[in-house]
Image: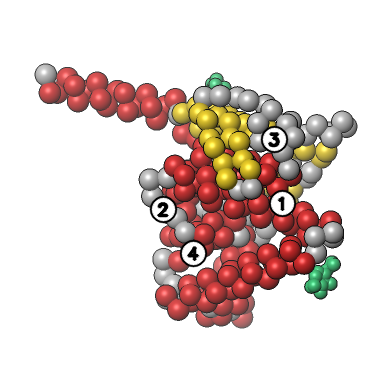
Amino acid sequence: MIERSLRVLLLLQFLYFATGEYNYGTVTCKNQACKYRPNVLDYKATACGTYNDTLTQTGWGVLDIVGGQGDDADLDIMYGAGYLEGVFTAERIWQHYQNVQDFFFRKRDADKLKKLKIWFDQQNSWMRNMIIKNKSDPMWRHVGLIMAQFDGLVAGYKSVAKMDLDVFAFQVLNGAGDLLDLLSVIDPASSADWTQMTRSQVLSYVQDRGMCSALIKVLGAYEDVLCPIQAGLCIKPL
Ligand SMILES: *[C@@H]1O[C@H](CO)[C@@H](O)[C@H](O)[C@H]1NC(C)=O
Ligand SMILES: *[C@@H]1O[C@H](CO)[C@@H](O)[C@H](O)[C@H]1NC(C)=O
C-alpha cells in the first residue's frame, strides 16, 4: 500500500513538472499599495496578466501583462505590472538568483561584495534623487517609471515568496550584464590579463562576456512593442 501511494505521489510530481503551472490574476494599485486577486482578469484594473510556466517543457515561461486600460496613474500602472511579475514568477526569481549568486559570488571575498553593495546603493540614491529633481525631464520621468516597475517587482515577490530576497538581489538580477564589468573594477584581480592568455582563452573569454543585441519594433497603432533579443552573455546569468 505504501509503495503504491509512493508511486502515485511520484506520478503526480512528474505530472506537475511536466505540465508546469498556469496562473492568472489582477492587481489594483494606488500609491504603491497593491491588492492582488488571483484567477480574475479585470482589464480595467491597474494591471492583469497570465503566466504560463512552461520552463521545463519548452525552456521558457510565457509572461503576459496588460496595464493602462483603466484610469490609473502611469506610476501605478508600472508598479502594478512589476508587482504581478513578482507574484507570478517568485519561485523562478529565487531559483535564478541561486544560479547568478553561484556564478558571480561563489569565489569572491565578502569585502568585494560589500563594495558592490555600496556601489548599487550610491547609484540608487543618486538615481532616485534625479527622478525627484527632474520631474519635467522626459528621460528622468521614464527612469522614474522603470524604478516604479522595479519597486513593484520587489513588493510583488515579497508578497508571496517563501524565501526572502533583499533589494540587493534584485539589483544584481537586473544588472547581470553590467556586473561583469563592475566586478572587474571592484575586484581588479578578477579581470583578464590579456598578455597571459592563449588565443583560445581569449576567444572563450569574449564569447562568455559578449553582450546581447536586441531589435525593437513598435507596431503601427502603438498597440505593442516587439523585442527579440540575441543573448550574447553567458547563459547562466540570463
Ligand atoms: C501553456 O503552454 C503550453 C506549452 O506551450 C501549452 O500547451 C498550453 O496550452 C499553455 N496553457 C495555456 C492556458 O495557455
Ligand atoms: C537634473 O537635476 C540635476 C540636479 O538638480 C541637474 O543638475 C541636472 O541638470 C538635471 N538634468 C536634466 C536633464 O534636467
Q: Which kind of residue does numbered mark 1 sit on?
A: Leu
**x and y percentages locating residue 143 in the rendered image:** 73, 57
Which residue occupies the foreground of this view, 101 or 129?
A: 129
- In the displayed structure, does residue 164 sit left or right of residue 152? left
The reply to whether residue 203 is visible in this rendering is no
**Picture layout, residue 82 above or below residue 71:** below
Q: Tell me if mark 1 has few (under 14), some (14-19) or many (20+) residues whose alpha carbon lies within 10 angstroms of its own.
A: some
Task: Tell me which label, 1 or 3, sits earlier in the chain.
Answer: 3
Q: CA distance from mark 1 to mark 4?
A: 28 Å
Q: Residue at x 34, y 27 (%)?
A: 14
Q: Which residue is mark 3?
A: 67
Q: Tell me if mark 3 has few (under 14), some (14-19) or many (20+) residues whose alpha carbon lies within 10 angstroms of its own.
A: many
Q: Are marks 1 and 2 in contact (CB under 8 Å)?
A: no
Secondary structure under the numbered disc 2 in the rendered image: loop
**Picture layout, residue 60 above or below residue 196:** above
Task: Tell me which label, 3 or 2, sits earlier in the chain.
Answer: 3
Task: Tell me which label, 3 or 4, sits earlier in the chain.
Answer: 3
Which residue occupies the foreground of this view, 52 or 191?
A: 52
Q: CA distance from mark 3 to mark 2?
A: 27 Å
Q: Quadrant of residue 35?
A: top right
* Mark number, residue 164: 2
- In the displayed structure, does residue 21 sit left or right of residue 196? left
- Which quadrant would the N terminus be assigned to in this image? top left
Q: Which kind of residue does numbered mark 4 sit on?
A: Phe
Q: Which kind of residue does numbered mark 2 sit on?
A: Asp
Farthest right residue?
Answer: 220
Q: Are marks 1 and 3 in contact (CB under 8 Å)?
A: no
Q: CA distance from mark 1 to mark 3?
A: 13 Å
